[in-house]
């Protein structure tokens, strides 16, 4: 069983004394820096408007990631809404993400479902102050694990056939994510028991450009 590395421990490991400027950073310190950078990239408002204008196979979608529970020491938590631009007040996906550093140094984005999600549409981060992770339902096997992590981008995906889904006749879903400073590429697909795709983009990922 892997265990999360606390932020305090990570940053302590990343400290390099002034007198040892040439000393190489520890592995924990490097991954801590990349974790902080990645969570900064993830936060904000994004849209696929440019892609939709250039390719009729894609809808114009608005994606919003808001940081919540800033005082928790077990990772970075986000409230996530995804909606068609034509109907932004009726999101078709609402989730809570926990982004954390696993014991094997991979960065994981775990996925949770909200109770009564309609009650949280457009919610400000303060709306979640009375909640805790105990109020959520984790989607086992649907976590996105980032293993390709550079100074310019992070790439991750779900494990093969691990994320159960019954949407539109699917048996399982897959997600692939590429995260960078001003762009999120997200490719969610649903597959039936024979491995035939039954929902999601076929040609490639949705490309969300940062607007805030």
Image: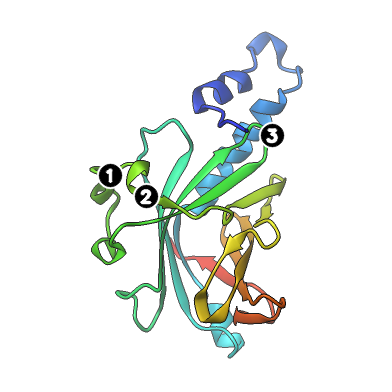
For mark 3, what is the residue?
104
Label 2 SS: loop
For the residues labelled 1 and 2, the Cα–Cα distance comes to 9 Å
Left or right of 108, for residue 96 = left
Left or right of 118, for residue 175 = right
CB contact under 8 Å: marks 3 and 1? no
Residue 57 numbered mark, or none:
none
CB contact under 8 Å: marks 1 and 2? yes
Is 199 or 148 nearer to us in this picture? 199
Q: Position of residue 186 (x, y in %)?
A: 60, 66
Q: Indicate the quadrant where residue 108 lies.
A: top right
- Which of the two marks, 1 or 2, is nearer to us in this view? 2
Q: Earlier in the sequence, mark 3 or mark 1?
A: 3
For the residues labelled 3 and 2, the Cα–Cα distance comes to 25 Å
Q: Earlier in the sequence, mark 1 or mark 2?
A: 1
Q: Quadrant of the N terminus?
A: top right
Residue farthest along the bottom direction in this orientation? 56
Residue at horizontal 30 percent and vertical 50 percent from the top: 125
Is 180 or 187 nearer to us in this picture? 187
Residue 131 numbered mark, or none:
1
Q: Position of residue 54 (x, y in %)?
A: 60, 86
Q: Position of residue 45 (x, y in %)?
A: 43, 62
How many C-alpha atoms fall within 10 Å of the one at disc 3: few (<14), some, or many (≥20)? few
Label 3 SS: loop
For mark 2, what is the residue?
136
Residue at horizontal 54 percent and vertical 51 percent from the top: 41
Label 1 SS: loop
Describe the colour scheme in one phrase. rainbow
């Amino acid at each position: 069983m892997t265990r999360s590395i606390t932020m305090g421990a990570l940053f302590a490991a990343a400290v390099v004394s002034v007198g040892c400027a040439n000393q190489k950073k520890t592995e924990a310190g490097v991954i801590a820096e990349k974790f902080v950078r990645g969570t900064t990239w993830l936060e904000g408002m994004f849209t696929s408007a440019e892609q939709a204008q250039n390719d009729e196979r894609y809808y114009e979608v608005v994606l919003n990631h808001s940081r919540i529970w800033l005082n928790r020491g077990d990772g970075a938590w986000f409230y996530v809404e995804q909606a068609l631009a034509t109907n932004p007040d009726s999101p078709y996906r609402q989730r809570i993400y926990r982004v954390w550093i696993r014991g094997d140094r991979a960065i994981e984005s775990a996925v949770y479902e909200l109770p009564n999600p309609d009650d949280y549409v457009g919610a400000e981060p303060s709306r979640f102050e009375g909640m805790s992770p105990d109020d959520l339902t984790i989607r086992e096997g649907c976590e996105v694990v980032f293993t390709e992590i550079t100074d310019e981008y992070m790439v991750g995906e779900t494990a093969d056939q691990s994320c159960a889904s019954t949407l539109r006749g699917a048996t399982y879903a897959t997600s692939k994510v590429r995260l960078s400073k001003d762009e999120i590429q997200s490719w969610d697909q649903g597959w039936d028991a024979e491995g035939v795709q039954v929902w999601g983009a076929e040609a490639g990922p949705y490309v969300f450009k940062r607007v805030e």
